[in-house]
Amino acid sequence: MDRDLNMELTHHYAQVGEVRLHYVTGGHGPSIVFLHGWPQTWYMWRDVLPGMMQNYRVVAVDLRGLGDSSRPSGGYDTKTVAQDIWALMHDVLGQKSFYVAAHDWGGPVAYALAAQHRDAVRAMAIFDAPVPGDGSPLSAIPRWHFGFHGEADLPEAMVSGREDVYLRYMFRKAGARPDAITEEAQREYVRAYSQPGAMRAGFNYYRAMAQDGHENREFLRTGGKLPMPVLVYGGGAANIGRGYFAMDSWQRMCSDVRGGVAPDCGHWIPEERPQWVIARLQEFFNEMDLAQKPRLSSPPSLDSSTPQPGAAMSMYFETVDTALIDVESLPWIPFTPYSDTILMKLIKVDPVRGDWITLLKLPPHTELPLHHHAGTVMVSTIKGCWRYLEHDWVATPGSFVYETAGSRHTPVTVGEEEVITLNIVQGDWNLMSPDGAVLAIENWKSMMDRYLSFCKKEGVEPIDVSSFGR
């Protein structure tokens, strides 16, 4: 199996008006555009994007003037920068609607984007960023660099030739740990911001804050609070992250805000705890996807009429019964984006317990990626032979393998016959790179989404495999 199949990010450039935007993209499914902060680039999302790509098309952009995008002399107010993102997503990539994930300056850009295109932005996830002009202080903690960056020409003169010293100070001071930003990432950011005009472009975002506040108040006055769901987390580290102030700011400007505080994080949440961020994004955007899909069927509801005296009340548990599942009628679907030749048949999901049951069909000479189990997994071999690279036994037809929670394995087929297994999985199934980084998270929700997407694409009437009824 090609482990990198459909999991590679590709680099692109797009001319949108006066700016040439650099962006990376990959994956499949509903689109999420990722917006970075200062002094970072798209690269801040490097450990988050792979975990989202199995269910979503990810687009991570270098904002106007930053990273490897071009640096016009003006247009650094968030209203204008947001229009850059809209032109990329709508005009270039053809997305009529999409999700947004943003950090730091990406947050105000996300607000301006959603305020100007309320029907297109389906939901937003924001990390450690307020909204300028929300009617509260711009920060829960006084931040000296806002004033410094806002001065005309002074910061450029002070940091020219010393970008490495200045940026590394910022990275060291704003995390829950001094090494929150890896050395590799720091080198990449120093490279990007040492390019001609890059520091000036970054400072220009701060210089436009008064304009941003005025325009955001006007958005609120003319259009009211934003209606789409917004997930907001502030960094929880004392005197560093914004804590609950971030939520408070967005609640002043939006009508549906949830979230809280990211534990063990300073300002750099997506880089400090990328797997935690992946989990929060998966939960949030999966919920949005399910809420916008028609339900397959509803469980029997209680009679809402007033019970007559002496009448027995019907309760939900009385409708739950043993079900015979016609496995033959269920389709084999490709295990995308990992492979088009590995097939799976989703038999049952239990949203309450988080369990999911599948048949898995693998052709000869196939290797699945290394994976980690949050819960136990039970595998019954129906056809063919397989093993784990980490063990010397071989499972044959009739074998039963019990995989303990927290274990890691790399399955491979053995011999020239295809392999079919019945898999009962509890909780998350995390696909990992050889060095142990989580590339993707599979669970009952992602399995259900894959099944429904396949049925819609193929024109197949889906069966409600989540039902507790007959």
Image (cartoon, grey):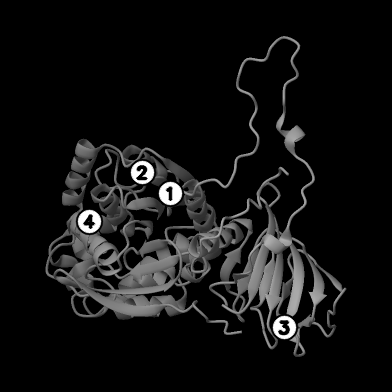
Residue found at x 76% / y 11%? 310
309 up-or-down from 220: above or below: above
Residue found at x 18% / y 63%? 204
Please report contact status of discs 1 and 2: CB closer than 8 Å, yes or no.
yes
- Nearest the camera: 420 or 106? 420
Looking at the rendered structure, which numbered label has been put on residue 459?
Answer: none
Q: Residues within 10 Å of mark 4 (few under 14, many from 20)?
A: many
Residue found at x 59% / y 43%? 297
Foreground mark, 3 or 1, reads: 3
Foreground mark, 3 or 2, reads: 3
- Sequence-earlier tag: 4 or 3: 4
Residue farthest along the top direction in this orientation:
309
Q: Position of residue 44 (x, y in %)?
A: 41, 69
**Label 3 vs label 1: CA separation?**
41 Å
Q: Which residue is mark 1?
A: 232
Q: Which residue is mark 4?
A: 78
Q: Quadrant of the N terminus?
A: bottom right
Q: Position of residue 459 (x, y in %)?
A: 51, 61
Amino acid type indicated by mark 2 = Trp
Q: Which residue is mark 3?
A: 412
Amino acid type indicated by mark 1 = Val
- Nearest the camera: 90 or 232? 90
**Label 3 vs label 2: CA separation?**
48 Å
- Sequence-earlier tag: 1 or 2: 1
Question: Of helix, strand and loop, which one carries label 3?
Answer: strand
Looking at the rendered structure, which numbered label has been put on residue 250?
Answer: 2
Please report contact status of discs 4 and 2: CB closer than 8 Å, yes or no.
no
Q: Residues within 10 Å of mark 1 (few under 14, many from 20)?
A: many
Q: Is residue 213 left or right of residue 167?
A: left
